Image: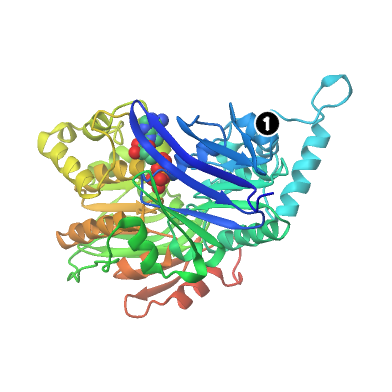
Amino acid sequence: MTEYILELKNMTKRFSGVEVLHEVCFSLRPGEVHALLGENGAGKSTLVKVMTGVHQPDKGEIYLDGKFVSFADTRESRQMGIAAIYQELSLFPDLDVAENIFVGRQPLAAGGRIDWRKLYADAGNLLESLGVRLDLKQKARSLSIAQQQMVEIARAFSINARILIMDEPTSSLTLNEVADLFRLVRRLREEGTAIVFISHRLEELFELADRVTIMRDGSYVDTRLLKDVTRDDLIRLMVGRTITDLFPKQDVKSGEVVLKVENLARAGSFRDVSFELRQGEILGMAGLVGAGRTNVARAIFGVEPATAGKIQIAGREVAITSPQQAIKLGLAYVPEDRQLHGLIPAMPITSNISLPTLFKYAQRGWLQDKVERKATYDAALQMEVRANNIWQMARELSGGNQQKIVLAKWLSTKPRILILDEPTRGIDVGTKAAVHALMSKLASEGMAILMISSELPEILGMSDRVLVMREGHITAHFSRAEATQEKIISAATQAVTSGSV
Ligand SMILES: Nc1ncnc2c1ncn2[C@@H]1O[C@H](COP(=O)(O)OP(=O)(O)OP(=O)(O)O)[C@@H](O)[C@H]1O
Ligand SMILES: [Mg+2]
């Protein structure tokens, strides 16, 4: 007998001849949370996909309960009790929440028809046991990313997995939701489920994981007990060097007000939002998912225009009713959902960088400009985008590297006002510092940046001022000096005292 429920030995995986996993070993005990850690492109997702039969290894063995196994596809691994939530969300947009949970495994009634009543009842029970509140009949396309992730999790739990793999499950969740998820994971661990957990947020590993396996450049580095390592140890093991300056925010004397928002509102979404943003300033927007931050950004950018209130740009009142118009006014918006909005997966990196894909509605010649292209390319380099070569298809890049390309492109379009929604989600610790350095540099050159972030260290480290939103309105406003983690959390989570939006 073995103490391991799952063991991978000498896993090697090549894509078109390029080795992305090199003799990686990994062992999982029942009832443990085992984290996988490594930089963007280190091979974490690929390793996970080998465990679930998405990819076939070129070399190496998988043992389940000490027995040699191989998985031709994910159906086979699922039958053996392995469930996974991948980095790329994969719901069917036109199916509702309950249908998505049981897709392909709908309960059948006599006569072979789908037993809809059972399907909704089962889905309801499942969500309740997970402590998740969702409308079972809501179509997936209208769910927020956090909600979509919850459905994915419910789907994974619905097969009674003995092994649950979560590839960056928390990257789009915040405070409350992460806490809920962790409660759930701990409960499963107590019941003996083995959990593989990937996250770039080191503090989460310390909070949740028992052991961590570190990978670098497709190779196994080490496996440690979390209680025996420090944050610096982990960074050193994964990056191979120490990183000291995690938030290299330069002090910039802010200039003219370039964006002024007064009593902005959109029915059912947010209300009474007022703030100013100055040249050279980074204004942080904190809050829980669903607090309305993204909706405010979308309204300012004209995606879903506000229904009341005023927007002034450089002192002039404007009515922004479309993204084209926002772009003409010097605004840019990097949405949180970059995989959907930012990248053409079937195009090579070069085209993704040089074509105005993000601005497909913009039709502006300047993006084709060689100078512009070079700037983007340099930004991508600065962020250490990891790929075989620049002709590689975007969809073949690791999640974090896809993010970097989209981000690089936006950062280098040099807008007057840049709205960043979760700029470093999914980006590894090493590169994060590079992204932050770039933001800081752009601000020092006069760009005004509105940064929505759910990561408090990022908010505290990067913002000149901090706004906190809760339930569709602004609940607090702090200077850099005043802002603390406790104050922000309290402003983001206090019980509601006012009426609804
Ligand atoms: N289908 C594919 N074809 C070619 N190369 C691939 C494919 N999938 C992944 N790769 C390459 O394998 C390497 C490892 O990618 P992987 O997605 O496993 O990284 P990761 O550790 O999960 O990174 P991240 O933190 O960014 O998610 C990357 O260099 C990536 O470009
Ligand atoms: Mg990955």
Tell whether 137 sits left or right of 248: right
Residue 151 in view: yes
What amino acid type is highlighted by mark number 1? Val
Residue closer to the observer: 420 or 390: 390
Identify the residue at horizontal 46%, vertical 42% (top origin): 45
Choose between 490 and 51: the one closer to the eye. 51
Circle 1 residue: 103
Name the residue furthest bottom: 482
156 relative to 378 in the view: left or right: right
Q: Residue at x 59, y 57 (%)?
A: 33
Q: Position of residue 440 (x, y in %)?
A: 22, 61
Q: Is residue 60 above or below residue 229?
A: above
Compared with residue 60, is residue 150 higher up or lower down, i.e. above or below?
below
Extreme-left residue of the structure: 371
Residue 458 location, x and y as percent?
A: 36, 64
| Residue 98 image point, x, y percent | 70, 38
**Between 90 and 13, the one nearer to me in the picture:** 13
| Mark 1 CB near ligand 2 (8 Å cut) | no
User: Ligand 1 falls in which quarter?
Assistant: top left
| Circle 1 crowding by C-alpha within 10 Å: few under 14, some 14–19, many from 20 | some
Most extreme residue toward the right is: 110
Which one is in front, 400 or 483? 400
Question: Which residue: 24% across, 35% down?
Answer: 353
Q: Position of residue 206 (x, y in %)?
A: 50, 66
Question: Where is residue 253, by image quadrant?
Answer: bottom left
